[in-house]
Image (cartoon, rainbow, N blue to C red):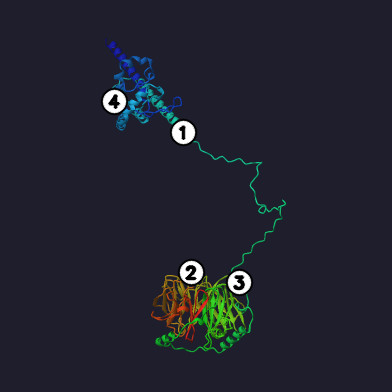
Amino acid sequence: MGSRSASEEKAGSRQRLQVKVNEYKENQNITCVSLRPVQTTVLGKTPKVYLVPFSLSNYKSDQFKHPKSLLNKNSNNEFVCKKCKKTEIRKTCRRILTPKMEATSSKTESTLQKSSLDVCTESNKRQHKSTSDTVIPSVDMESIQNLDSDEDTTLGLDEFSGLSPYERKRLKNISENANFFASLQLSASAARLREMIKKRQPPESKRKMPKKRENGTGCRRSMRLLKVDPSGVSLPATPTQPTLIADENPLLLPGPLEMTPENRDDDNDLFKGFLQTWAEVSKTSIKNTEKELSSIKNYKANLNGMVINEDTVHKVTKGPILSVALHPSEIRTLVAAGAKSGQVGLWDLQLHISLLKQTHQSEEDGIYVFQPHSQPVSCLYFSPANPAHILSLSYDGTLRCGDFSRAIFEEVCRDERSSFSSFDFLGEDASTLIVGHWNGNISLVDRRTPGTSYEMLINSSLRKIRTVHVHPVHRQYFITAGLRDTHIYDARHLNPRGSQPLISLTEHTKSIASAYFSPLTGNRVVTTCADCKLRIFDSSCISSQIPLLTTIRHNTITGRWLTRFQAVWDPKQEDCVIVGSMAHPRRVEIFHETGKQVHSFFGGECLVSVCSINAMHPTRYILAGGNSSGKIHVFMN
């Protein structure tokens, strides 16, 4: 009895296992379908796909109609499907459903609850039309993976505790095969979807190039452009000549130049008389004597007597004036001007006024213009030793001396590789000169040695030098104005390799236009800076530092088209500074070293422009100012 009951129990367990395996296979066929719609095309018509939300937890047998192929797949399990259709499907679905699938199904019910009624009715109406349009819902890929991972927990350890290892392994293989076929089904559906998307994309439209006409007539072209003669014969090729670009400012030939005025066509006797007169006047020039400063009261009274009229205003050069000088003669008035065009103009004021009174004379009589340079003339001085000589320096790297007695411009120094900016006399006899270069170099020139080269070239600590001025008493000292700094050097300790300054004035915040010692004692230094300030320093004791005495607010912004201001000392009154002004009406102003304004020169209709460059006569009360159009304005008593 015991063996019989054991065999019956073993046969019952095998029967139950076979039933569960068949149920599991059937459930695999039922659940492993996709929730995504599979869209098919029947007879060229576009099918409409309807999604029907459902939950495996609330599954009903009559809610969806399953294909017969799924129910009749295994003939051995027909009696199980017929008898236990409603009850067994619910049990197996509940076993297979994992917690994650329940959460997914609950979310699907909540999101699609609103549209479920309409979709179900529409699907039920169209379900009888074609089986190809039906939608077979299935579990998502993620649910299948959960099925595989939670296989043991889903089926339950208690229910399969009596199975043999062989039966367990076989059941596991069945589940793995089901997962594998489900993944193949999803990949195939994704491939079909990509193919449908590619087919629906519009083809790229490529522009078809028109075919060239081989035998057709082409467009007409000019025979002149083809260089063909009207008769059809090709013209001979014209030889191409290289175009030479002429230099706007070519350097003049080295050596002395004749003093020939450009504004006079004929060599008349008037010009010869002019040269002879100034050669004789220079011989009787005054000698240097010690001068005493007059009081400010007398100085102001003399300045008030200086006037300007139409006869003392005239255009002397072509282009802006960059330098002005007055001949030291006390008998006659001769004004020299250096222009941006390289011209040097001489104006004999007395001769010009006397000739204007004669109706048959021209207005240009008494004015002579020369061209000793090819570039701007930035510095101009009459020789302190021989006033019949006028020295001019230009950007073209030449320094020339005009001799009235011989009517020539001698070449003192020439450097075609560098550009000169300013110069001054180191010795009182004007035999030695110091020249500043735009690249920051300084050169010493000795006029007594033959040739036109410099004696020594010094590399200064400045990148650029605008002006150079020598101390009037201690002539071994000279001051240079650079971009931002002003340096004082000792000529006795200059080194060609590089020289360091004795003193540096670093109070300036912008570029410096000029720096000059006071003319009699050299106890003051005045600088003109682009920060709208005139600064006066105490240079009575040249040591490691020079204190700043006064700062004068003055508009020095001249712009692009006007010559920059340069404040200069009055040779007769070394505590007063002369400078142009941008104020209206136009004027020339004089300031005391304390910063107080001493006098302003107004010209009314005779002074309607800005006089940027000004110069005062060394002994007489005569002021000459040049503007940026080539005119000279002279104030005199």
**Crowd rating for badge 4 (residues with CA inside 10 Å; few <14, some 14–19, many 20+):** few
Residue 154: x %, y % from top left: 31, 26
Which residue type does callout 2 highlight? Arg
- Of 385 and 272, nearer the camera is 272
Please name the residue that numbered disc 1 is placed on.
Answer: 200
Can residue 202 be seen here? The reply is yes
- Total numbered badges shown on the rendered structure: 4
- Of 251 and 204, nearer the camera is 204
Tell me the element at label 2.
loop
Residue 315: x %, y % from top left: 53, 77
Q: Is residue 65 above or below residue 288?
A: above
Residue 431 vs residue 636: left or right?
right
Which residue type does callout 1 highlight? Arg
The disc placed on residue 560 is 2
Mark 3 or 1: in front is 1
Q: Residue 374 falls in which quadrant of the image?
A: bottom right
Please name the residue that numbered disc 4 is placed on.
Answer: 58
Q: Of the two numbered discs 4 and 2 on the same chain, state the one appearing first in sequence.
A: 4
Tell me the element at label 4.
loop
Residue 127 vs residue 309: left or right?
left
Q: Are marks 4 and 1 in contact (CB under 8 Å)?
A: no
Can residue 478 be seen here? The reply is no
Q: Of the two numbered discs 3 and 4 on the same chain, state the one appearing first in sequence.
A: 4
Please name the residue that numbered disc 3 is placed on.
Answer: 251
Tell me the element at label 1.
helix
- Of 355 and 506, nearer the camera is 355
Q: Of the two numbered discs 3 and 1 on the same chain, state the one appearing first in sequence.
A: 1
Q: Is residue 292 above or below residue 201?
A: below
Q: Are marks 3 and 4 in contact (CB under 8 Å)?
A: no
